[in-house]
Image: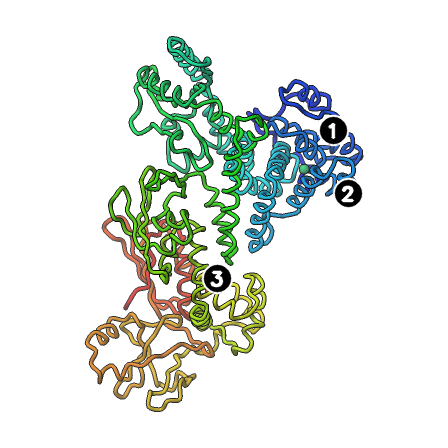
Amino acid sequence: MADENKTSMAKQSEPVPKGMQNAPTQELTISTLAKKILDMDKQYDLSKILSAYQFAKKAHAGQKRSSGEPYIIHPLAVADILLDLGMDTDTICVGLLHDVVEDTQYTLDDIRKKFGQDVAILVDGVTKLNRIPIFDKEQQQANNVRKILLAMSHDIRVMIIKLADRIHNMRTLHFLPLEKQRRIALETMNIYAPIAHRLGIRTVKDELEDLSFYYLDSFAYSEIEHIMEIKKDEREAFIESIKVRIRKRLEEEYFAKEPIIEGRVKSIYGIYKKIYINHKSMDEIYDKYAVRVIVSTVAECYMVLGIMHDMFRPLPNRFKDYISTPKSNMYQSLHTTVLGRESIPFEIQIRTWNMHVSAEYGIAAHWKYKEGIQGKDKMEEWLAWVRRVIESQQTSDDVEEIVRAIKNDLSPEDIVVMTPRGDSISLPVGSTVIDFAYRIHTEIGHKTVGGKVDGKMVPLDYELKTGEICEILTSKDPGKGPNRAWLGIVRTNEAKSKIRSWFKKECREENIATGKNNLEQEFKRAHIRLPESDWEMFLADDLKRHNCATLEDFYASIGYGGIMLSKIMPRLKDRYVKEYGSEEEPENLVTPVVPQHESSGKGYIVLDKIDDCVFKFAQCCNPLPGDDIVGFITRGHGISVHTVNCVNYQSARKRNDPDEMARWLPVQWTNNASTLIPTNIEVIAVDRVGLVFDITKILSESHIQILHSSSRSLRNGNAIFEASVRVAGTDQLYTIMDKVRKIHGVITVERAKK
Ligand code: MN
């Protein structure tokens, strides 16, 4: 859907957020836009823009937005936002034309004939981007996000237009039904704001975040807004007096060009994040208000820093030099927090004009200041990041992981680590030596045998920190490859996918065997009983979803970790129950399958009548269907069944007496029969009136039969509740334990021994 606000389901649900200063106050028309263009320093082809407007106006004639306004208001507003970002003539034209192909009778050809190939390609890009829904089916999300990133990598202007489109839709979101408001706000917060952040367009990112936040948690939004309003005058006066003092002092020094000193207010969502994510109180946030000093050269930045630390007392550990080590989105500045009058802390940011433009406009600065200020290198760096995110997605078959990874890879909280040669490498927080090695080069990653940080040997799972110098030690052995255990160590999706693709290539046979084996195990555990010849049909959907042409590919993918069984099993189990009947028939009996004694050599026999009295459940460990079990041949009482973890079995294994061990034999549960087996649970909770009632209510709602229960108060104010219940197996037991755990005041829920 090209424009979410197009629907006629107008419903005025909430007032427009207050304090959205970026929203234009003056009514926007084509003449105000034209006047703005003429006032710009930059050269624009005004006649092309005007004819794009005429074309769009004609195409959308008669269409209305949810607000009831003529549709053309929307493309006009998008063009205006793009103009403020300093985008070029073609991009502004596309802002005006962006919904034409999607929503009107005109085609891409019409646009190409009238406005040329460049404009047509951009319109096509935006149209395609708009057709990608982000939050449809869960499995599709990752693919869709990947498509969005791909669209962006062809021409980043497509994404900038999309961001402008989204800003205007967010500014007018209150005209949509509540349900839609929430979905669009969530999509904006999770995908578009992070992309704007990575592209360095702070103005866009802040506005998208604040607007989404308003719709996602209007209560918190208003609260922060309210706190900011109190004493606003007082604080503004404080910042003003600081600015005057700084200006006066800087006038005494020589600067190439007079420094600009400005005050700045942090965005509402920015404050929210500090309060709720970093658990800071409002008073601890020193950069709600900040003073910014903009100068001409890097040397002047450090000079100003020295002067500031001379004028005000700096707080320890609050100085950050993002000039020598830029943030991963290429942000550069010096930050320091100092104490002002009456010991009120405030932040000072010091940067050059180039840095300032980059910090505010990010990648858009490339168009805003085409002449010289932004080099081609910087553009290349932006694109390299986009490509890296896309590449790192290509070997992961697990779509849910991709969504998570993209959000991770979009996370701004990065560390910067140096190579011994002094190159800085930025990585997400928590990255290890192995992540660092893979970032330098895939081959270096594969051949890593050790790492040195600041000259000292560290383990491979060492978590790197900003400012450390990391050196990778590699093996000379050409056959050396990564270790499977690394998958559990690395933090970046990039390293993970490179390790996986190594295993994918190098060990296909092993992967197939491992994967098949794991799947068999999981099927058994989930009571999925299908002849192997049916597997391909049963798994057809999953093969497709994970891009596997054959069942072998699917096994291989499980084997190298590209498909996580824990993720797909619940779905498979559901499907099995739907297509092949119920998973467990409660009226049947669950019995262990006991293999005949080795001498018989015939494999498993099924004992399906409990009256056979061939086995009994050991009292010491009380096994339940679902537990891994082992049998013991007793003298005269058949087989007693223990859990594999049972102390009796474990100590027998330690003794390792051959005669005794011969009497232990592997057994497994079948699901052709079921009975309810008594077991015990123990709950510890904060003692309160109604606790026992709440627990027994959960049990009875889950149709669990209670054989016996007791409770007593403990001296520390807690209470202990014990019950003996009948359950069908561990699945059922763990489900109710989870439910009990959620009861107010419950501290622990354990499966108790007798
Ligand atoms: Mn639109």
Q: How many marks?
A: 3
Q: Give me the C-alpha separation between circle 1 and circle 2.
A: 17 Å
Quadrant for ligand 1 reads: top right
Q: Amino acid at mark 1?
A: Lys
- Across and down, in percent, residue 259 comes to 45, 15
Q: Mark 3 or mark 2: which comes first in sequence?
A: 2
Disc 1 crowd rating (10 Å Cα; few below 14, some 14-19, many 20+) is: some
Mark 1 sits near ligand 1, with its Cβ under 8 Å away: no
Mark 3 sits near ligand 1, with its Cβ under 8 Å away: no
User: Of the numbered discs in the image, which one, if any, rests on residue 563?
Assistant: 3
Q: In this orientation, which residue lies closer to the viewer: 702 or 582?
A: 582
Q: In this orientation, which residue lies closer to the viewer: 70 or 9?
A: 70
Q: Give me the C-alpha separation between circle 3 and circle 2.
A: 43 Å
Q: Secondary structure at mark 2?
A: helix
Identify the image quadrant of residue 171: top right
Label 3 vs label 2, nearer the camera: 2
Q: Mark 1 or mark 2: which comes first in sequence?
A: 1
Q: In this orientation, which residue lies closer to the viewer: 610 or 364?
A: 364
Image position of 699 with respect to 290: above or below: below
User: Of the numbered discs in the image, which one, if any, rests on residue 48?
Assistant: 1
Identify the image quadrant of residue 46: top right
Q: Residue at x 33, y 87 (%)?
A: 598
Q: Amino acid at mark 3?
A: Ile
Image position of 210 with respect to 506: above or below: above
Q: Amino acid at mark 2?
A: Asp
Identify the image quadrant of residue 214: top right
- Across and down, in percent, residue 4 comes to 66, 40
Task: Decide if residue 701 is in sight here.
Answer: no
| Residue that label 2 marks | 109
- Across and down, in percent, residue 423 comes to 38, 39
